[in-house]
Amino acid sequence: MKVLIAFPNKLDLDFFVNEISYLKKHFDRIVVISYYGDKSKYDEIAERYNLEYFIVKKHSWLNILNINFFKWLFSKDVIREIKKNCSFSHKGIKKFARIIYYGLFYIYSKKFILKELKSNSDNQIYLYSFWLADGAYTVSNFYDLKSKYNIKKIFSRAHRYDLYIERNKLNYIPFRTYIDCHLDEIHFISEDGLRYYESHISSNKKPKKFVSRLGTSNPNGIRKKIYSKDTITIGSCALITQVKRLDLIIDVLSKIPYNFHWIHIGDGIMGNEIKKYAAKKLPSGSFEFLGYLSNEKILDVYSQYDVDFFINLSDSEGIPVSIMEAMSIGIPVIARDVGGTREIVNPTNGLLLKEPLEENFDEKIIEFMKHRLDNIEYYKHLSNNCLKIWKDQYNLEKNSEMFIKKILEE
């Protein structure tokens, strides 16, 4: 029996949930160890996919009193990490707190993993972290126990915040070297991520490294309809946080000389601030904030609103799933050349803005979008290429099966 023990961050994470149905085809049991979240959602997902889950308690600081925590804290690898990265400065203390957090997550999760390993000694066990962060650190601690518990493979995905050190406020992600030495495989969602890891982090050739792209689905075969029109509809989809730079989108839209309508999907900590900024700078009735929508509804909304362009001006990205979704129905994309975005956006299917942004980047966006009004054949060319690139490289079913095939290879 093949058993997968997975760390997705939160069980209801859309990207992970998208994978589950494909994982179920190849694993007899799936056990998820998750952050605290909405239990009703977790129960619904667990029932739908016939999986089991455990929650790492939100307030796990009590584990500091656990004897196993002290053993971990004074282990040579942890002492080495602390000595190398921590000091009595404000930043050094924050780094120490981050190390402690990783340790607490590991100690609390360890009991669930050991329970599974001991009760399934005859099974083939696979340990999987969806992020190259605390989950990856946790599973990497079982590397030396592989033969004892019949662990077939220990592996992790790598995205953005969990990979690009300079995108973290502390310029620090704990246990990079330790994780690198104690994983069998790392699967990067972009070629840029793989290159970054090999030039900034990788200390040895031990973990096999692959580019295993994420993907999206378009189960209803929705397709962008193209006809002559006099108003351009622009869509965006992201958490409303500083890094997503919705303020830049608003600044660009405020300079558009033709009729437009903007819809944004998603909410976040800067929601009220951004909504006020839009109301201040944009014409009344020219924008809508639709809030959070499930993945299943997003494509229907793009079709309903007849979205002509998808725009993403984030400061940092891996390869945005939101771009994959838009391209899956033939919507051309405007995005900055950050992270792995150039791997999905190019002149054949959209507008890739040079980084750092040029002074006249807004003029380039406005001129590019005008093609929808006065050059419909060119717009059709962009739309068709979006669909082709999505089918070839970012189809969820195709990419999930390729990812799982790599996992199961000896």
Image (tube, rainbow, N blue to C red):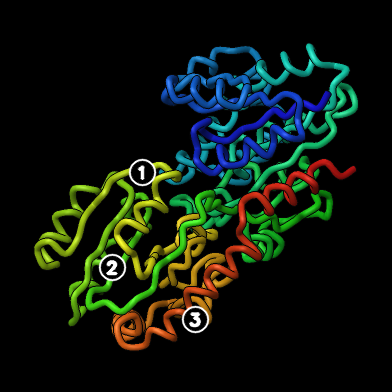
Quadrant assignment, res 134: top right
Cα distance between the residues tagged 3 and 1: 29 Å
Q: Vertically, is 286 above or below 361?
A: above
Which secondary structure, mark 1?
loop
Quadrant of the rendered image containing residue 30: top right
**Residue located 66% across and 24% down the image:** 31
Which callout, 3 or 1, points at the residue further toward the start of the chain?
1
Q: Position of residue 368 (x, y in %)?
A: 36, 83
Q: Residue sitting at 53 percent across and 20 percent down?
A: 55
- Location of residue 16 in the rendering, given as x and y in whole percent from the top left corner: 57, 39
Check residue 381 in the rendering and tell me which mark sits there, or answer none. Answer: 3
The one nearer the camera, 182 or 337, is 337
Q: Earlier in the sequence, mark 1 or mark 2?
A: 2
Q: Relative to residue 371, is residue 136 drawn left or right? A: right
Q: Quadrant of the N terminus?
A: top right
Q: Residue at x 62, y 19 (%)?
A: 52
> Quadrant of the rendered structure where residue 81 is?
top right
Which residue corresponds to mark 2? 233
111 over 16 or under it: above or below: above
Q: Which residue is mark 1?
A: 293
Amino acid marked by disc 1: Leu
Q: Secondary structure at mark 3?
A: helix
